[in-house]
Every structure is written in structure tokens, then in C-alpha cells.
Image (tube, helix red, strand yellow):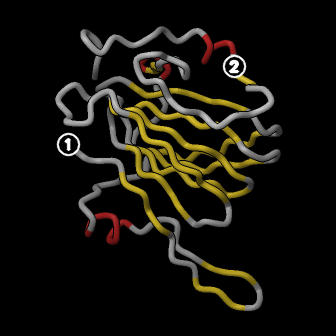
Amino acid sequence: MNQAKLIKIEPIEDHRGYFARSFCENELNAHGIDFSVKQANIAFNKSAGTLRGMHFQLPPYAEDKIVTCTSGALYDVIIDLNRESSTFGQWYGVNLTSENCLSLYVPKGFAHGYLTLLNDTSIHYMVTEKYTPTHESGVRWDDPAFSIDWPETVSKIISDKDNKWTNFSLETDGV
């Protein structure tokens, strides 16, 4: 099973700013990541405190993701839902910003979500499978099974769909 990984983008800087590769198949392969892009998505969030997640797709349309913040800042969270994994049921969170040049590799079987920390935050993510609504799933962002330590915000802006995901059972659920 693949493990989640933090990817550091190496910018080449000069007086104009910087240039960096955000995706290189050969470099990912050298780190044990086989990633074939089937779809690329952009999400724009007007307000700080926007929470999206926790989403994943079920097999046979399970997907790997590489998530990058292109403007603003977000707290990105993943949960390992792979029953056979040594980190099953554990979550990991990291700040992704337009300035820190970090991306997060999210393997199949992990739920993914984020909370925007600034207004006008944009996220770019590449996935290895096309979006398939019939195989879309998720868990609650505030599920007590995981006790995610989200950053404090004035308010959380959450879709009705994300508020309706059911709680996860560590005894019976998994992908």
C-alpha cells in the first residue's frame, strides 16, 4: 500500500519570482509513487473558514491525489481508511500555502478534506481516476472516531452534503 507523502516543490528563484515543476512523473516514480493523471481540478474558496471534506471514491474508482495550494492558505487533512494499513483510522494535517511550496500526496483509501485559513484560497489537485458520482463517499469532518484537531476559526462554512456524511465505525467500516 502507498503511504501519504509531503512533496516539497523546489523553486528556482530570481528577481521576478520563481519557477517550479509541480509534477514530474520520473521524480514521483523515484519515490515509489506511480501517478497517472486522469483529471485535474481547481477549487476556489471565497472565505476563510470554508471546510470541504472528508471525501473519497470507492473502488474500482478509488483515486490518488496530489493537492497544492496555489493562493491563500489551508489546513489539509487526510484519514487512512484502509483496513489493512498499520495507520488505519489515523489522521494527518498540514498547512499548505501558496508560499511554502508543499504539496500532499493522498493515496487511494484515504479520505481528504481541508479548511481554508485565508480568504480567496485556491487549490489545485490532480487525480488518478475520473470523478464517478456513483462511487463518491465521505465521512464527517467532526466524526468522533477520528477527533481531528481542526484550527480554530470564527465560523466554518460547510456544504449540506458534507454535513450529512455519516460517522465511521472503526470496527466495521473501511475501504
Could you tell me which secondary element the residue under label 1 belongs to?
loop
Looking at the image, which is closer to me, 172 or 160? Answer: 172
Instruction: Locate the C terminus and report the quarter of the image it occupies.
Output: top left
Looking at the image, which is closer to me, 98 or 66? Answer: 98
Q: Residues within 10 Å of mark 2 (few under 14, many from 20)?
A: few
Residue displayed at 60% across by 44% down: 75
Residue displayed at 69% across by 91% down: 14
Return the residue found at the far bottom.
15
Relative to 153, 163 lies left or right: left
Q: Report, in whole angstroms, how far the alpha carbon at label 2 lies from the one at label 1.
A: 31 Å
Residue displayed at 42% across by 57% down: 6
Instruction: Locate the N terminus and report the quarter of the image it occupies.
Output: top left
- Image height check: is 98 above or below 56? below
- Residue 147, image x, y percentages: 47, 24
Relative to 44, 167 lies left or right: left
- Image height check: is 9 above or below 117? below
Residue bearing the label numbered 1: 1
Which comes before the other along the chain, label 2 or label 1? 1
Q: Which mark is residue 65?
A: none
Q: What residue type is labelled 1?
A: Met
Q: Which amino acid does label 2 sit on?
A: Ser
Instruction: Quadrant for residue 134, please give it.
Output: top left
- Image height check: is 164 above or below 122? above
Q: Residues within 10 Å of mark 1 (few under 14, many from 20)?
A: few
- Residue 81, image x, y percentages: 32, 27
- Residue 174, image x, y percentages: 28, 19
Residue displayed at 34% across by 43% down: 107
Marks 2,1: beta carbons within 8 A: no
Could you tell me which secondary element the residue under label 2 belongs to?
loop
Return the residue found at the far left.
84
- Residue 109, image x, y percentages: 32, 32
Q: Residue 159 carries which label?
A: 2
